[in-house]
Amino acid sequence: MKMSEFDPAALCVPGVRELKAYEPGKPIGELERELGLSDIVKLASNENPLGASPRAIEAMQRAAAGISLYPDGNSHALKQALSSYHDIEAARIVTASGSDHILELAARAFLDTSNSAVMARYGFAIFSIVARATGTDLRIADAHPPEHSRQPYGHDANTLIDAADDSTRILYLANPNNPTGTWLTHAEVEQVLDGVSANTIVFLDEAYHDYVAPFEPDFPDSRALLERYPNLIVTRTFSKAYGLAGARVGYGLTGAALADVLNRVRLSFNPGSLAQAGAAAALGDREHVERAVALNHQERGVLDEGLRRLGLVTIPSVCNFVTVDVGRPGRDVFQALLQKGLITRPLDPYGLPNHLRISVGLEAQNARLLRALGQVLA
């Protein structure tokens, strides 16, 4: 066989053939190489501009002395820290290399060509990737329309329930949702849980939970919901408010039986030793998280107001980013901002071709972004 005749895409399962690779935020180093720029500001991947807790960094440095050894495959110390923090049994905790890894575990365990999954339009892209790769029937529920009074482009509990049936094994909720920044109330999440079959697993991704809970009294108490709904998986991450995106560590909370199933398909020795040590230490530094959340709350308002002063329409956000309609192809504006050393996130892969997602940075970074965007739009 000639190399030109080998087509691996033709050998894939149908779900994989239809997929496009996930587009991550452009790395700073890549932009430096491409354009020869320095002093680049990355506001594309919703990272914590304050960085990680000093305690987490010190813990990872200490753990590096044992890097020649495999990590604890059961994440004992991290699970104990999480168990104490959430007041939940360690047997109900699943740790992984990022919360998106737990999405993959659930898809591998429960989805195939004989059943279905449900997600909302404009929902987190990884939902679609892990589900479609299994060959399952992925159903996209309509989101709220742009003119919705509270949650434009947000998840709609009614359409999610209507899209599910007895064949549905997983229903995905991102709460708050990336990339829209919208959220469902406690009552709305309960409505979804009560409205689906008892054999439908509701996967509640709460990656941005820390940014919302102090400010929104109606935000779901997912810890309480776990005691009522055995078909619920709640995931959190250390990549956002905890500032450990590069370590890749997240976790899931669920029932012990469901956690056991997920652990059966989890590959051994993840998260890594440094990630486990850093996450456990970060969990104990609430002051650092509170500073990050307070900074975000202040600067998100400034960023949103600045975008509106430019005559742009933003989606009300409770996360550490603002999604904005720039009134023209967002990828063109993204490219123009790259020339000025600013990395944002175009949202055409999400079906939002005129939108950019802009992470909340430090005060000076946000001001620079607003100045540059004003110049680009002018």
Image (cartoon, rainbow, N blue to C red):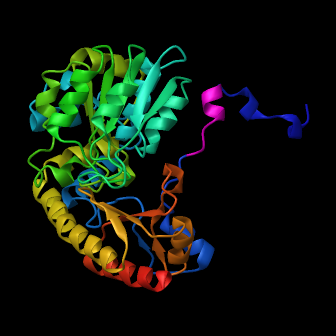
Instruction: Give the residue drawn at x 52%, y 72%.
Output: 333
Q: Is residue 302 above or below residue 147?
A: below
Instruction: Give the residue drawn at x 17%, y 47%.
Output: 283
Residue 208 in the image: state x and y as whole percent. 26, 49
Tell which of 49 and 125 is nearer to you.
125
Q: Is 209 on the left-hand or right-hand side of 335?
A: left
Instruction: Give the residue drawn at x 51%, y 37%.
Output: 129
Residue 325 in the image: state x and y as whole percent. 42, 65
Q: Is residue 126 above or below residue 338?
A: above
The reply to whether residue 73 is in sight is no
The magenta segment: 14-21
Q: Is residue 248 above or below residue 134?
A: below
Q: Is 18 on the left-hand or right-hand side of 305?
A: right
Instruction: Give the residue drawn at x 14%, y 64%.
Output: 294
Q: Is 210 on the left-hand or right-hand side of 378?
A: left
Residue 85 in the image: state x and y as whole percent. 11, 38
Q: Is residue 25 above or below residue 151?
A: below
Does residue 19 show up magenta in the picture? yes
Quarter that holds the N terminus: top right
Tell which of 359 and 47 is nearer to you.
359
Tell which of 144 and 302 is nearer to you.
144
The reply to whether residue 369 is in sight is yes
Say which quarter of the image contains residue 304: bottom left
